[in-house]
Amino acid sequence: MKPLAIFGGTFDPVHLGHLSVAWEASELLDADVHLMPANVPPHKPPPTASAAQRVAMLRAALQGQSRLTLDTRELEREGPSYTIDTLIELREEQGARPLVLLIGADAFANLATWHRWRELFDVAHIGVLSRPGVDATWPDALEREVAGCRTADVSALRGLPAGKLIELAVTPLEISATRIRELLVDGREPRYLLPAGLFDDAGLLSPYRVSR
Ligand code: ATP
């Protein structure tokens, strides 16, 4: 069965790093990918752009293709967006379909701080996306905890609904939303770090241009 992969994040704003790694993961896993903006990210300071503004940017970014789909379910819930709650909801909807939670290597290194993190493997596989500047080795305690789940074989994920961990080596793109926000505050136009559609509507990037 074709897996469903979930790629969560703040997307403040969505950039070509997000889109490229999500696209390549979709190809490597032969999966549909849902990009899922978080409402109140439990691990980070509040986003600069509102949820509605981040959704508008994602919509503009995703035009013209069908592998990557916007999924706004976390924005419809009150309070912190816990991934475990989202995955349990998806599992109920999707039956035995393989679910794959995609996480960048920087975020994965902190997995043990996530709410009910061990239970994530009961409801989904995890795909770790390589990211430039992030050490490929994981903290010892995390490495020990996940050793039994690791696989290098993509087909292992297709036959099971959940429980495996795979590293996905994607094309390194050293792009971060933090850097893009800094450039925009400085009045720069990071045209080739962001999807072109974000420049078509003058309002889309305005939340970042206001000097603070
Ligand atoms: P910020 O700079 O605001 O922290 P970010 O660029 O890391 O933002 P997020 O929305 O926090 O973007 O990231 C969502 C997910 O995308 C995370 O799992 C993160 O690791 C991953 N990610 C973001 N940029 C890249 C990239 N260039 N390469 C690989 N993974 C990435």
Image (spheres, grey):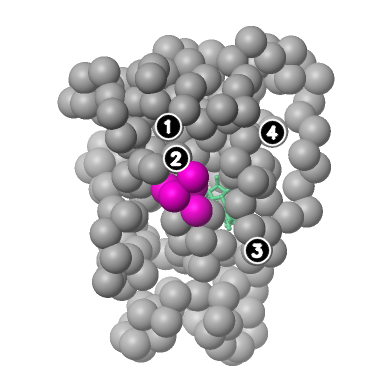
Label 3, on which residue? 173
Label 4, on which residue? 109
Label 1, on which residue? 100
Mark 3 lies within 8 Å of ligand 1 (Cβ measured) = yes
Residue 83 is situated, as x and y percent measured from the top left of the image, at 42, 30
Classified by dominant secondary structure, the portion drawn in magenta counts as helix
Image point 32% across, 55% down: which residue? Answer: 67
Q: Are marks 3 and 4 in contact (CB under 8 Å)?
A: no
Q: Is residue 15 visible?
A: yes
For marks 2 and 1, give the CA distance.
9 Å
- Between 62 and 98, the one nearer to me in the picture: 98
Local secondary structure at mark 3: loop
For marks 3 and 4, give the CA distance.
19 Å
Q: Is residue 53 visible?
A: no
Image point 21% across, 26% down: which residue? Answer: 94
- Tell me which label, 3 or 4, sits earlier in the chain: 4
- Between 207 and 118, the one nearer to me in the picture: 118
Label 2, on which residue? 29
Image point 26% across, 48% down: which residue? Answer: 72
Mark 1 lies within 8 Å of ligand 1 (Cβ measured) = no
- In the picture, residue 87 is in which quadrant? top left
Q: Are marks 2 and 1 in contact (CB under 8 Å)?
A: yes
* Type of amino acid under label 4: Ala
Identify the magenta region.
Answer: 24-28
- Tell me which label, 3 or 1, sits earlier in the chain: 1
For marks 2 and 3, give the CA distance.
20 Å
- Tell me which label, 4 or 1, sits earlier in the chain: 1
Local secondary structure at mark 1: strand
Local secondary structure at mark 4: loop
